[in-house]
Amino acid sequence: MLRPYQTEALEAVRARKVPRGIIALPTGTGKGHIAGHLTEALNTKKILYLAHREELINQLADHVERILGYGNVGIEQASRSIGYFAPSVVASIPTLIARKCRRLQRFKDGRFEAIVVDEAHHSTADSYIKIWQYFGLMDEGKKKTENPPMPLIGLTATPSRGDNVGLNNIFDDIIYQMSLGDAIKKGWLVPIYAYTVKTKTNLDGVRTRMGDYAEKELAERVSTDLRNEIVFNACQENAKGCKSLLFCVNIEHARNMAEYFNNNGINAKHIAGNLQQDERRAVLSWFKNTPGAVLTNCQLITEGVDIPSVECIVMARPTKSKTFYAQCLGRGTRLAHGANNYDESVKLGKDRVILLDITDTTSDLGRRAVNISDIFGAPLPTKELNGCEMLKELEEQQEILEKARRGEYVGTEAVPVNLFAMPAQIPKAKMAWLDYGDMFRLSLANHGDITLTSDTLDRWNAVYFNNQSDEEESIYTNAGSLDDIIVLVERWVKAHRSDVLILVDKNARWRNEKPTSAQRGLCKKLHIYIPPEATKGQVSMAIDRRLASLKTKKQDKEKIPI
């Protein structure tokens, strides 16, 4: 039986106006069930389903076979090869492109009338591009073809990538989506109760590669006895007795974490890609069937693993990728096994998932790790959380900033951000943009500010907030990259706000001068401590950050962002 939003998603596929579209639904809301019914929505049984892992392939085949019946679905993966009479095929991406794509070349023109790709946020990888080119969805220059021979439907819980390669290079639009907040609000997932767990580990100097922290350097910083002790104590204090899933940096970190728990009397195992398949299955079976078990892993249980009994997620691995973070979080938000809504889940013993957000320090706000507040788009992303339910926390933060906007005192605890963090490092930027993790902001002094945000297809949008009129104006939409939107907006500033050019120039001489008495006076009123070595430019940016955090732009309070 289809849930209401699943029916809506299928209707959106039927009514779509683009050949290449994405269905974006949070983990645990039944994307596989929708996949099985796409044969009806696309009005064909001749569909090629694509996935990159065995677990996902088996799940897809099972869902489709329930709709089409036994014998109507073939599997093309490693030693498994399709029956030529099966109208639908579920195939492995690595298998299709192996050995000069010989397996792929078995599928001649006309063999399929549609393609469905699971975990579509991977679709810009080179392995996928070979398949898009083979079926005429992309040309040799890696550009979308204007009239593709068949529709492409992507399914994902996280329609964005961590390496800044936009999915708009593959897909035309989001044809249906439901946010994590909406799924929780409507009872399709359990609420998240979050705790901020601060460590003394400093991430300064850890380099970034492909949009995330370099794994080896990160592991050296976080895989320590002291930090492991902090993680263990946090679990005992906030989630004692809960079935807990810990996300770690690498195999050694996962093994060390499991060992620390065992040495302190808590039953724990680790799971990683170096284990044989039968060993992994045995560990997963143990975890599923053992109350209060602790499982540590490194990038293995993020996609295709369904364990509804997870009660606690521990983000022991810092990441700069909201995509990866959301995948990890999704391992715990599912309803209890057998429940079809939140009320049934409560009766079956699961009314929430606990999240322990392990937070390391950094002097550069733009390089800090993603946290749960970033996933929900909370306006105060660095505020410490103490077991709050995230939707309520989001509403409270919005109310805090609304009061600040009305001029009511809200206290300095509402803005615990590193005000002296370095400005954003954007190669093409000539102006002093600030990086807030999920957006970039350029202060135009008394004229207001410009914010840059990306949508679910990684298309960049620029909005100008005018302090004088208290109104927002959309300047540019759907830019293909951050560099593109930066160039466009800086041209706009030169054309429309030429009087502030000296103030926004990131290389202006005044930035290296000593702070003025006026700046010091304003900092005193705003409760900003000025370090002895701070420059005039650094103090200016600190003031901008504080004022921005005490102001909210007009928002629809009923809308709960992802």
Image: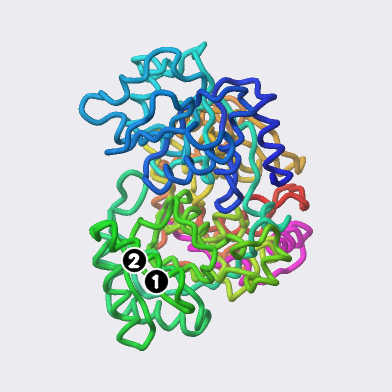
The answer to whether 421 is drawn above or below residue 470 in the figure is below
- Image point 54% across, 63% down: which residue? 308
Q: In this view, which residue lies farthest toward the bottom?
A: 265
- Image point 35% across, 61% down: which residue? 281
Report the span colored magenta: 395-422
- Is 293 positioned to the left or the right of 401 in the image? left
Q: How many marks?
A: 2
- Image point 55% across, 43% down: which residue? 32
Give 275 or 37, whichever is nearer the viewer: 37
User: Residue 286: which disc?
Assistant: 1
- Is 234 positioned to the left or the right of 175 in the image? left
Contact between marks 1 and 2 (CB within 8 A): the answer is yes
Residue type for callout 1: Trp
Q: Is residue 527 visible?
A: no
Q: Residues within 10 Å of mark 1 (few under 14, many from 20)?
A: some
Give 499 or 37, whichever is nearer the viewer: 37
Q: Position of residue 77 (x, y in %)?
A: 33, 37
Residue type for callout 2: Ala
Q: Which residue is mark 2?
A: 282
The answer to whether 23 is drawn above or below residue 234 in the figure is above
The answer to whether 310 is drawn above or below residue 112 in the figure is below
Q: Position of residue 356 (x, y in %)?
A: 49, 71
Q: Is residue 417 visible?
A: yes
Q: How is the image coloured?
A: rainbow
- Is 424 positioned to the left or the right of 311 in the image? left
